[in-house]
Image (cartoon, grey):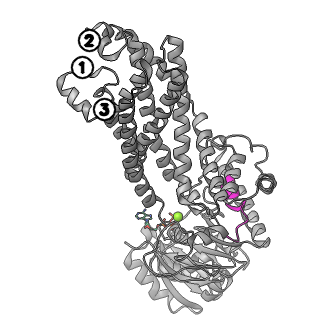
Amino acid sequence: MRAVDGISFHVERGEVFGFLGPNGAGKSTTIKVLTTLLQKTAGSVTVDGINLEKDPSAIRKIIGYGSQEVSVDDDLTGRENLRLQCMFHHLHKADAEKRINEILKATGLEEAADRRAGTYSGGMRKRLDLATAIITRPKLLFLDEPTTGLDPQNRVAMWEYIKDLNKAGTTIFLTTQYMEEADRLAHRLCIIDNGKIVAGGTPAALKAEIGADVVQLALPDNGAAADRARARQVLGPVAGVQEIKDYDGGLMVFAKNGPSLVPEIVRKLDDVDVHITQISVSAPSLDDVFVKHTGRKMRVEEVTPPRRMVFGGRRRRPM
Amino acid sequence: MSARDIFVEVGAVFSRWLKKTFRRPAFVFFAMVQPVVWFLLFTQSFAKIADIPGFASSTGTNSYLTFFSAAVIIQTVLASAMQSGIGMVTDIESGYMDKMRVAPIHRFSILLGKVMSDGVRILLQSIIIIVLGVILGVTFATGIGGVLVILAIAVTFGIAWSGISTFIALATRNSEATLMISILTTFPLLFLSTAVMPQGLLPDFVQSVATYNPITYVANALHVLVITGYDWTTLGYGLLVILAVGAISLSATTVMFRRAVAS
Ligand SMILES: Nc1ncnc2c1ncn2[C@@H]1O[C@H](COP(=O)(O)OP(=O)(O)OP(=O)(O)O)[C@@H](O)[C@H]1O
Ligand SMILES: [Mg+2]
């Protein structure tokens, strides 16, 4: 089977490039090819002008990689883990020690530095892992789901940290299954599903493409075919409705001025006896972009609380 | 890539493994407690073996303790060598291998540093056994010089044997399977050799198996060094067997390792 199938993209120097997709989309596979860990069957990859096939070791000199699963040595202390990484990158000792102290401070691991990593909490291990990836000051940093498994507080801290790194000049390629993360961090992003890129661009442009508010109607039993058909029939002609899309839990109505349409939508559906279990209106999000292109929701735990039930038209987040 | 770079890389991998080894309570157990158990258990329960007619004449000693000290060394070396592959698998499983693979280091440094640390671990364990033996009353016919040769044999044979375990580890990529297969192949070989019993006292069929068993030749070499003196023919066979086992196991390991780290 093909985990990744014929994808093409380019990352600009100095940007944060996001790779957004659900479980099994092919994010890790892509990142492993780019970091020389996995051999691709076809195609070509150039990193910083270096051909991946011809000179993988030159690429290894300029990249850093934070894997999805934390990989620190639990028998070694945090400091020793970092020191080892410096030796792998042939840093001089004095320089290495200086960087180690800096990074321990920056990642808040100073106090735990001389304890074995095996005694760290999950979040601390994740931070140590990130520290080992960036201590060598890579030009290009690959981060595979850097915040999965972190609590909200640590997640926000990690976002700030990634932003700072980027401001300091590191180009960052990051994968995530969180819309909000991609939205906040990535200058540009690709949405990947089933090994294929389904959409790409800046988060703003992707959302603008939708050009409408999204009224999401959750139907009982995830929407029987008959219910869906009747709903489409009555909602299609409503003024302002641009498009109606199926998603796995019901229907999504793309409409200008969505909030003001809610009463009418509810009435029309009631007329034809279609029940709704939930209705919400929001400005388009990357989630909607994903649904629009795949007909499915991403189905991952959300970073922010779920959309509010609205009947009045409060937007989740200003555009 | 300069020689200095490679030195640093191998040193990094080497020191990592040494630290890991000595921080594991299991290591301390295997290194200290197990040889004591073997010495006490076997030499107490089998001391009478030395009274069997032919034991003294064929081995050159009437002390089973002295004879058996070689077996303890071999057993410890084998047990230690068998663990070698486990670390490699855990690194693959934990993703640490990938961490090393994205680093700009020579792939071979990863293997070399590990093998060297295995060698040091085996050396330390062998020293412990010899000290223990001396305390219990083993005398070494070849003196300090002979003890050094014994240590050299233990380390080289250990590294050669660790190649088998690493090969199995890289082939199965499964730490439990590695340990199981290693134990199942190694321990019968120990008892089907002259390590625990002189050749003449082994049952006929075991004798013929022992003739083809590499451990026999290493055991014989250790026995002469402990009991009788420098017997160059026996030592020569021992060396040859170690080189042969090492050449086969380490080249097979290298092939598997290349495959495991290939990008
Ligand atoms: N070693 C493997 N052998 C076989 N199939 C694999 C292997 N690794 C990944 N796959 C398959 O390749 C596809 C893509 O996997 P990949 O790990 O790249 O997804 P992902 O986007 O990183 O997902 P996640 O968010 O769960 O990490 C999946 O269908 C997965 O089952
Ligand atoms: Mg993944």
Residue beneath the point at 31% across and 25% down: B194
Q: Please identify the quarter of the rendering in which residue A272 is found.
A: bottom left
Q: Which mark is residue B200?
A: 1
Q: Which mark is residue B54?
A: 2
Q: CA distance from mark 2 to mark 1?
A: 8 Å
Can I make out residue A55 in this image? yes
Q: Note whether A114 is above or below A296 in the view shown.
A: above
Q: CA distance from mark 1 to mark 3?
A: 17 Å
Can I make out residue A151 in this image? no
Q: Do dots 2 and 1 share one subunit?
A: yes
Q: Note whether A175 is above or below B97 in the view shown.
A: below
Q: CA distance from mark 3 to mark 2?
A: 23 Å
Reading the chain from its start, which is encountered first: label 1 or label 3? 3
Q: Which residues are magenta?
A: A128-140
Q: Note whether A205 is above or below A26 in the view shown.
A: below
The residue carrying pointer 2 sits among few (fewer than 14), some (14 to 19) or many (20 or more) residues within 10 Å by Cα, namely: some
Label 1 is found on which chain of the structure? B
- Secondary structure found at label 1: helix
Nearest the camera: B139 or A78? B139
Q: Is mark 2 within 8 Å of ligand 1?
A: no
Q: Which residue is mark 3?
A: B189
Comparing labels 1 and 3, the label whose residue is closer to the camera: 1
Q: Amino acid at mark 3?
A: Leu
Reading the chain from its start, which is encountered first: label 3 or label 2? 2
Residue A206 in percent (x, y) is at 62, 84
Q: Amino acid at mark 1?
A: Gly
Q: Is residue B62 magenta?
A: no
